[in-house]
Image: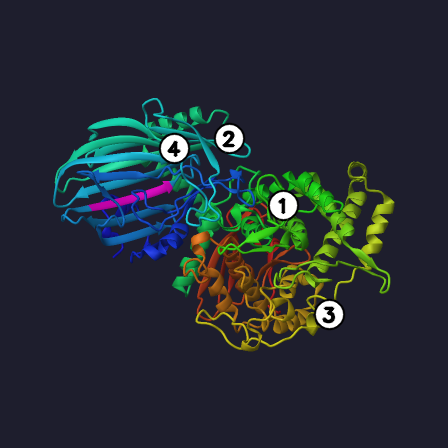
Amino acid sequence: MIRDHFNKELRELMSDDEWLIVREDYNPDQNLAYESLFGLANGRMGNRAAFAEGGNKKTLPANYIHGVFDKSEAFMRELANTPNWLELKMYFLREPFGIEDNQELNDFISVLDIKKGILFRSYTLTTQSGRKTKIEKLKFLSRSNSYLGAVRTYITPLNYGGLFEFENRIDGTVTNFADFPRFRVKHLNTLEINDLEGKGAFLKSETRDLGLQIGTAAAVEVKNLKGEDRLKSKQFRAFGEIACEFFDLELAENETVVIDKLAAVCTERDQEDVYQACLKNIEEFKEKGLERELAEHLEVYKKMWSQADLILEGDKKMQQALRYNIFQLMSTPSPDDNQTNVGAKLLHGEEYGGHAFWDTELFVLPFFNWTFPEIAENLVEYRYNLLDKAKENARENGYQGAKYPWESADTGEEECPAWTIEPDGTCYRCYVADYEHHVTAAVTLGMANYVKITGDQKFMNKKGIHILLETARFWVSRFSYNQEHDYYEILKVTGPDEWHEPVDNNAYTNHLAKWNIDFALEKLKEYEDSDPEFYNQLCQELEIDRNLIEEWEKLSEKIYTVGEQGLIEQFEGYFDLECEVINQWDENKMPLMPESLKGKDKNEICILKQADVVMLMFLLPDKFDLETQRINFNYYEKRTLHRSSLSPSIHCMMGLRVGDSRRAYDYLERSAYVDLDNNQGNTREGIHAASAGGTWQSVVLGYCGMKIDQDGTLAFEPSLPDKWERVKYSINWKGEILDIEVTQQDLKVSSREKSVAEDMYYKVNSEK
């Protein structure tokens, strides 16, 4: 039993087994993946699941903070690894306690409680001299006060006693990519180290480029199980860039001591004086106590789960995976910060530098649109706040309007590097930022869907319309006129399928660009009819006149969209590529490259990295009739390898939409388990945000068939797998909390407020 490893207090704190992600077999080769998998976030910072006591050789401890980016010698601005406040070193007769410190490890278990946002650990260490020590821990990042984190450690010497020594440390020597010498970068300068007015340890640092200050403080409280103070002595020391509070205590055999390490992390993004902010937070934390802070933390998660939980009966593994993905999604973005976004690896790892991609708008944002619209608003406002920089990006590249970067950090500049260096030192030119422009349409589509789902017309009128019109202006300038064929086209572009770059007239990009322009024209017409005063003010501000509108209309009518019915060619010349269909799958039921095409230039063969035309069909379903969607799904599904983790969920949903569910569940499992099973082998780099969001969409929008009909009504076309008995979830439908229950025979929708009649907000479509 899981709970048998823990003491009574921790057993009673744990949720039921269905909410627990468990690691029982300790293998150091799996440490880095589990540090991501069991990482915690609280909407402001993310902390990897490294061992606080140290000693293990394979580890990448990290504490990331939203908005704390730096470049220094790196190729791009990246989330800076900030000082490690976790460390609590333990010694007996100068012998350290630590994982792999030449000690025998027994009864190891690590448990992530996704219902409560708590990480538990328990194990017994046996030294070469035979001393056995039981160690138990809990860690949480407070959702009640996002500046705070804490670790509680229980230490019990099982067959000895005497003087124990400890170090409460804050390590400012941390780097990014610590285990990649070629890429290793230290992003922080240490400015100050002190004893926090005798209350603990404090380290002030700053980012090297912009000088953003970060304060990190940590204090300890030491008591026995009766609540009596057991601290013997305490002394502060500084070792280079390490703040260290030394303390010791006497422990008898089988006596248990409880050490609470309380941490506060503040930055100049939130506080003018990071030292005073840390001091205040630590003082209040100590006065409140860990138990009370934890209780308030649990109340926040209880409320969040009441809005976001998804109950699935019929597949226990899938149920756990869905909740895990939801937990990491809802834990990451800030509920009160519109200057930050969601990185492609959340706040759990270094890959992609914490940058926002199109993943946010098309895979992550839908979850928040339907469950936490206040967070969704922050995510779309982030793009609005960087609109001026997007306009600058367009001008620098010879275009008009606003061109959003493929990779975005805090400044809005393009962070995708022009050159890539491989681990072996070889370099190659990276053209992603030069050609993969479809992110600009994704930003606009994400914003439009936010407004459509939430009904937030205030945002559209004040901010969204500016995104829409400036991105439309970019697309107009991105088109070239083909005099021979009398149409407008986009040359040298890369669509979602990154294995073919650059190409001419990528169908996905041309269609999304046309949608962007047409939607801008539609909104302008709407404003002209409904609010002429606002319309005139808007046109004057953005330098839009009747001639420009007519120019956009004429261009839109002549956009070459590479077909709208039947089989659509992904780009010009695609059908001429060497082609074989996929006929083999691996043990994870994912497709394998046909033997005859292995080793060949990917630009010269038909096999795709990920969904492209199929992605287009998914995003613009009203543009293509169902038969066209079916034809294209059947064709491209046989030619897609899904080497991007965001692709399987799209094929799951599209297969269900066109009535081809043969592989839909395989795709769902690939998406849902990408990190829990580490089925791409890169969980060590962080959690796959797009897969997490795509998994939720696959269940809610795919199998439960939820959508908004053309008349604006919430509609359902459920098609549950045979083994699923019931799916139950909640959404925020334009301010109304709806509970939705889908079974094999029935669908029920109920409003918690019951302010409107059920037939006013939903309908069930029984026919495809």
Q: Earlier in the sequence, mark 3 or mark 4?
A: 4
Could you tell me residue 130's position as x and y percent? 14, 49
The first of marks 1 and 4 along the sequence is: 4
Name the foreground residue: 649 vs 452: 649
SS for tag 1?
loop
**Residue 565 — which label?**
3
Find residue 22 and report its image quarter.
bottom left
Residue at screen point 26% across, 36% down: 259
Q: Residues within 10 Å of mark 2 (few under 14, many from 20)?
A: few
Mark 3 or mark 4: which is in front? 4
> x, y percentage for residue 426?
54, 56
Which residue lies at the image location 51% right of the left edge and 44% below the top edge? 333
* Nearest to the observer: residue 658 or residue 347: 347
Reading the image, the residue beneath label 1 is 414
How packed is label 4: few (under 14 Cα within 10 Å), some, or many (20 or more)?
Answer: many
Please report the bounds of the magenta region as a residue range: 134-140
The residue carrying mark 2 is 270
Mark 3 Cα shell of 10 Å, populated few (<14), some (14-19), many (≥20): some
* Place of residue 481 in the rendered image (x, y in percent of width and height, measured from the top left): 83, 57
Q: Residue furthest top?
A: 197
Q: Are marks 1 and 3 in contact (CB under 8 Å)?
A: no
